[in-house]
């Protein structure tokens, strides 16, 4: 069997009785998507052990945008089913010694998800409830609003520590999210922040006592747009985020396979190999 099992695509959003609508795949869902009676969706990542973002999970996130748009959803909150991890970021197995065709498809879907966040017709928010490094924080930054629960975990973009040079559009998104100088220091040094420091630095917009409160605060943010026409919200959002959005579009137009080429460099592959071996050693130590 292939290392990467093909996960069936999430079923289309279906209207259920009462005030709850839900979405799931037929056998092994990588996410759960429910919509409350007020039209606000909660998308919960559920790919244990650490919700790493692989090709199939990215495809399901992308499909969720389409399903919710078709249902005229008022907003979406992203969170995690895991108690101590929001997401470990991009799945290293997708990047290390990959099948090139799959890797290109992986990056295509990652960028497609980014574009859907940027151009969403409904507000998006992220309720962070655990460790959120690298690509996981990129996912959080793409949403309009971020609330973190309190806890003993870190948040930030640490790709340089893995030997990966961030894309220019991600750097621009960091500069849009936090102070430009602080974004430069954080990106180059792969700085990770505690929830309280993340709030001080502007990586998140609010802090909550727990996941439930974080989700509720995200929902309260989304409700602010109840009386705002969707088209004015989406157009204004695109204008305020024009620099990272246009940088992403330019990046994809000029060289859509640039990230594949970057990841396949010997130095990057060597760094990923060292990281994977370090993780394997930790697993072996826990089992002895």
Image (cartoon, rainbow, N blue to C red):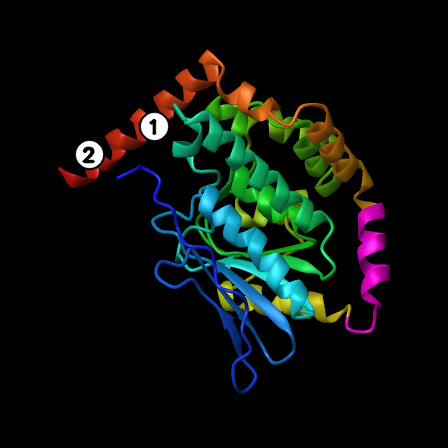
Q: Quadrant of the C terminus?
A: top left
Quadrant hosting residue 68: bottom right
| Residue 287 image position (x, y, % from top left) | 16, 40
Name the residue at 50% across, 22% down.
Answer: 263
Q: Is residue 14 left or right of residue 94?
A: right
State the residue position of label 1.
276
The answer to whether residue 53 is seen in the rendering is no
Task: Work out how far the residue at label 1 is from the one at label 2, CA to CA, in angstroms.
Answer: 12 Å
The question of residue 232 being in magenta is answered with: yes
Give the magenta-colored segment's residue range: 226-239
Task: Determine if the magenta segment contains residue 153.
Answer: no
Q: Secondary structure at mark 2?
A: helix
Residue at numbered disc 2 = 284
Give the image location of residue 265, x and y in percent: 49, 14
Q: How dense is the environment of label 1, judged by Cα within 10 Å: few (below 14), some, or many (20 and up)?
A: some
Question: From the image, which quarter does the N terminus lie in?
Answer: top left
Residue visible at 60% across and 48% down in the picture: 140
Task: Residue lying at the far top in this picture: please name it.
Answer: 266
């Amino acid at each position: 069997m292939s290392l990467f099992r093909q996960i069936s695509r999430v079923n289309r959003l279906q209207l259920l009785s009462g005030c709850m609508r839900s979405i799931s795949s037929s056998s092994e869902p990588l996410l759960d998507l429910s919509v409350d009676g007020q039209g606000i969706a909660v998308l919960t990542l559920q790919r244990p052990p650490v919700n790493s973002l692989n090709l199939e999970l990215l495809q399901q996130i992308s499909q969720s945008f389409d399903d919710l748009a078709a249902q005229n959803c008022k907003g979406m909150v992203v969170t995690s089913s895991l108690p101590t991890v929001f997401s470990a970021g991009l799945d290293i197995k997708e990047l290390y010694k990959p099948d090139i065709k799959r890797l290109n498809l992986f990056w295509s879907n990652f960028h497609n998800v980014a574009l859907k966040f940027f151009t969403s017709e409904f507000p998006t928010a992220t309720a962070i409830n655990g460790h959120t490094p690298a690509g996981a924080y990129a996912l959080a930054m793409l949403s309009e609003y971020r609330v973190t629960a309190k806890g003993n975990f870190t948040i930030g973009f640490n790709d340089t520590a893995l030997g990966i040079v961030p894309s220019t559009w991600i750097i621009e998104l960091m500069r849009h999210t936090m102070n430009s100088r602080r974004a430069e220091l954080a990106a180059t040094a792969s700085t990770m922040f505690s929830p309280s420091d993340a709030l001080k630095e502007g990586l998140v917009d609010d802090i909550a006592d727990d996941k439930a409160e974080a989700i509720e605060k995200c929902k309260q943010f989304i409700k602010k747009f109840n009386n705002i026409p969707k088209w004015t919200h989406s157009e204004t959002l695109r204008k305020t985020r024009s620099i990272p959005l246009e940088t992403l579009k330019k990046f994809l137009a000029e060289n859509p396979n640039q990230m594949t080429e970057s990841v396949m460099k010997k130095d990057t592959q060597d760094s990923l190999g060292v990281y994977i071996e370090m993780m394997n050693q930790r697993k072996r130590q826990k089992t002895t």
